[in-house]
Image (cartoon, rainbow, N blue to C red):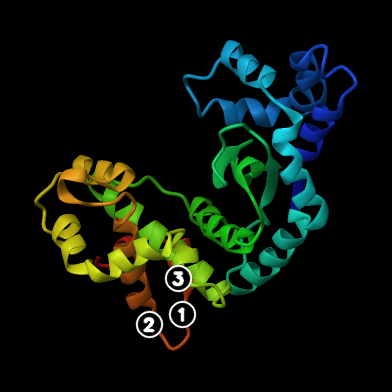
Amino acid sequence: MNIRSLYRDFFRFLEAPTFQADQWTAYNAHYYKPHREFLDVYFSHFPLLNEANLKERVEAVKPADYTQLKNIVSACPPEDDIRYAHKVCSRIVAPQQNPEVFLMIGFFSPDGFVMDFKGKPVICFGLERFKDFFLLKVLFAHEYGHYLLNEGAAEIPENKELKWKLLSEGIVTCFSQTAFPEYDLSCHLFFRRDRLNWCQENESFLREIYCSEKYTTRELLDFEAKGNPDLDLPPRAGKYLGYLAVKNYLSREERPDFGALFEDISVLLSIDL
C-alpha cells in the first residue's frame, strides 16, 4: 500500500521563508504545484471553487491554526494507524489491488472519502479537522469498505439509489465493526451516542419513513442528507436501517462472507431493509 503524505508539504508551505510576504506564491510552490494532478481532481468536486476564492482561503491561513495538528502528527503519525488498519482489513477481505492513500489538507475536505484518480479509486483523508486520531483506524476501515465497493463498481439503477445509499453504508459499518470490535457502535456509525440511542428507540418510526413508500426516492435522499425538522427526523438516520439490514443478513452465516457483498453489487441490493 502506498501512502502519500501531502500534508507534510502543506506544513512546508506554512514554514516557507516567503510565507509572510506572499502566501499564495508559497502555497503554489510548496503544496499546489508538487501535487497539482491530485489537487486538480479533488478541487473539481467543488464546482463553486475557483482560483480567486481558493487564493482568498490561502491568504487567510494562519500557521497558528495548524499548531495542534502539527503536534498530533508528530506525536502520533497517522501513517502508523493506517498501515495497521490496512493489515487488519485486508485479512478480512483482500482487495483486487492495494489502495493508494492520500493524507491531505484541503481547507474543507471530508475527514475520509474515496474518489477516482487516474482511472481508479483512491482513499483520501482530510486532516484539517482532526483533533486526535482516536477514530482513524475505524475511519480507514469504513473508507476501505467504500474502496472495495468502488472496485466492483457497476451502474446503480435510479430506482435503487436510496437502497444503495443505505445498504452501502450498512456494509461498510458492519465491516469496520468486524475489523475493530473494541469500538462502540456509535463510533462505527460516526454518531454521537445520543443519536444512536435515538435511532435504536425510533427504529419503527425510521421504517415508517424509509420503507413505507410514503415519500419519493428524491425526498428520502434529501431526508438522509439533511434530515427533516417537520418530521423530527435527524440527518443520516436511515443508514442505521442499512446497518441493521446487513448485520441481520450476515448473521445467517456462521462466518460472515463480506467478499460476496463487496464483489457483487446485486447481492448487496438483494438485501431487504
Q: Taking 216 as reference, is 112 left or right?
A: right
Residue behind mark 3? 185
- Tell me the quadrant of the picture where the N terminus can be found: bottom right
Residue type at numbered disc 3: Leu
Element assignment for label 3? helix
Q: Count neighbours of disc 1 (C-alpha within 10 A) and say few if under 14, some if 14 to 19, many if 20 or more.
A: some
| Dot 3 and dot 1 residues touching (CB under 8 Å) | no
Residue most extreme to the bottom: 254
Residue behind mark 1? 256
Q: Taking 118 as reference, is 170 left or right?
A: left
Q: Nearer the viewer, residue 35 or 92?
A: 35
Residue behind mark 2? 251
Between discs 3 and 2, the one toward the N terminus: 3
Residue type at numbered disc 2: Ser
Residue 59 visible to the viewer: yes
Q: Nearer the viewer, mark 3 or mark 1?
A: 3
Tell me: residue 14, above or below residue 102: above
Q: Nearer the viewer, mark 3 or mark 2?
A: 3
Tell me: residue 91, above or below residue 52: below
| Dot 2 and dot 1 residues touching (CB under 8 Å) | yes
Residue 236 circle label: none
| Position in image of residue 58 (x %, y %) | 67, 21
